[in-house]
Amino acid sequence: MEISKETTTEVERLELEARAVLPPGVFEYYRAGAGEGISRDEAAAAWRSWRFLPRLFQDVSKVSTRTELFGTELAAPVLVGPAALHTLAHPEGEVATARGASAAGSLLVQSARAGRQISSDRWWFQAYVLRDRSITEAQVRDATARGARAIVLTADAPYVFRTAVPEAGTAAPENRPRERQQDPSLSADAIGWLAGISGLPVLVKGVLRPEDAVTCIEAGAAGIVVSNHGGRQLDRAVASAYALRPVVEAVGGRAPVLVDGGIRNGADILTALALGASAVLIGRPVLWALATGGAEGVRELLDFCRADLARTMAQAGVPSPAHIDATLLCGPGDPRARP
């Protein structure tokens, strides 16, 4: 399939190419949203509703996108978010994704439901707390032994919405043994429990409400990830682009705040950083890149994100992440943002 870059964005091009190479059931599994798909479909548009107020007479002859999170140097504040079963997109699965992410100076947050396990010093482990906590404990201890540098507790999925993948023989979630189902009685006490097991910083993913962010920080969370689970859990959940700033304000600098959901280019990334995020996570686009180009495809996508962020920063008059703040933006309710 020949696709013109002049008429599609980079991520749209990758998605079209991935649709052409993936089995239909796998493509729909990756793309699926809960309910009517409203939250999934609103995610990208929400970032595009913000408008920049660029600064003049700034020295942007050199622009750096480099940052650091929990002791890991990053070429840009862009991580690969957790997604299950990368092996459906490429035979090497998460191994290829992690290799591509590392080559781009990024890191992978590996899903608890990965198709392949990885071992390196540039990855975080995404955990669900299951009804049988001994299973979660074993997973976290194993991830720590394999070099994970942080634990990302996904807290927004007491019950799982997921489309089955008939080509891969993947069972529907309701058929999981009870002990392997998410614990719907999960409380913030799990944060300290996971930190104690692993000895690692624990971030909580799935936060949309400021008061929940405060609860997580007070329970020992080292970071917050603003996310609506890619629109895969509760349809009509608010877009991350609108939930981010109130959460950042509630956290008040006590911990890094990350965000995912619908981020597709440098303008989206700069918007997230201006709203207070320390970094962003990218999900589905990485799967499209993996399906079409393996590890090299993942590297190319992340390099594109870094370069596009640098270009956008230069145009906005900010030479580094340290110079980015909320004054760069006017929001959807501001008259200056109206067409």
Image (spheres, helix red, strand yellow):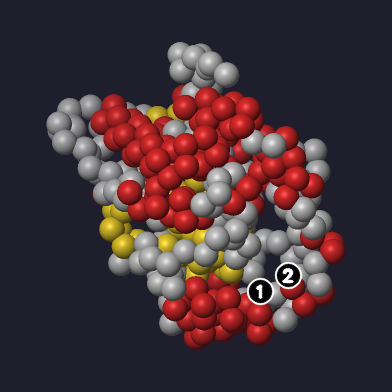
Residue 20's spot in the image, x, y percent? Answer: 63, 27
Q: Secondary structure at mark 2?
A: loop
Please tell me whether residue 223 is drawn above or below residue 286 in the rendered image: below
Q: Secondary structure at mark 1?
A: loop
Q: Amino acid at mark 1?
A: Val
Q: Position of residue 131 (x, y in %)?
A: 74, 78
User: Pointers 2 and 1 in contact (CB under 8 A)?
Assistant: yes
Q: CA distance from mark 2 to mark 1?
A: 6 Å
Residue at position x 28%, y 58% in the image: 73
- Does residue 192 appear left or right of residue 79 in this picture? right
Residue 65 seen: yes
Q: Classify residue 55 by image quadrant.
A: top left
Foreground pick, 246 / 149:
149
The residue that label 1 is drawn on is: 129
Query: Is 264 left or right of 70, judged from the image as shown?
Result: right
Q: Disc 2 designates what residue?
A: 182
Residue 90, image x, y percentages: 55, 45
Residue 174 image offset from top left, x and y in percent: 84, 62
Look at 51% across and 85% down and name the residue there: 197
Count numbered badges in the picture. Answer: 2
Residue 3 to residue 72: above or below: above
Q: Residue at x 77, y 53 (%)?
A: 169
